[in-house]
Image (spheres, rainbow, N blue to C red):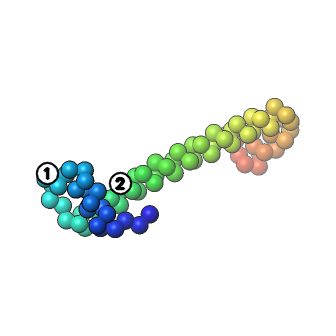
Amino acid sequence: MTLKKEDVSQAFFAAGLEGDYNFLEDDLMKLAKVFGELRDNELNERVYKATQNERARCVDFVRSLNPAVAQALEDKKGPL
């Protein structure tokens, strides 16, 4: 997502913070970038956890059908 200085400034003022702080547009862009990176990191962590959980469920399901195939899957992909 590409942020524009105008959009970031408008969001800052819409939040009602312009009276309390006197940030330059470049400072607002730095803040927006950091918050965006934090959000991206959190999303990546959630996706990773969801993927690991789904993988574990798939292995358990395969194990219930065919333990030998499940063991081969774990041997190939590593332990859960």
Between disc 1 and disc 2, whose residue precedes? 1
The residue drawn where x is 45% and y is 54% is 40
Q: Quadrant of residue 61?
A: top right
The residue drawn where x is 40% and y is 52% is 38
Element marked by disc 1: loop
Report x, y in % for residue 37. Answer: 41, 56
Q: Badge 2 local density, few (<14 within 10 Å), some, or many (20+)?
A: few
Element marked by disc 2: helix
The three-letter code of the residue at mark 2 reads Phe
Instruction: Report which residue position mark 2 lands on.
Output: 35
Q: Evaluate whether residue 5 shows in this view.
A: yes
- Judged left or right of residue 62, residue 2 is left
The residue drawn where x is 86% and y is 36% is 66
For this orientation, the residue located farthest to the top is 64
Instruction: Report which residue position mark 1 lands on.
Output: 20
Report x, y in % for residue 5. Answer: 29, 67
Q: Is residue 1 above or below residue 58?
A: below
Which mark lies nearer to you, 1 or 2? 1
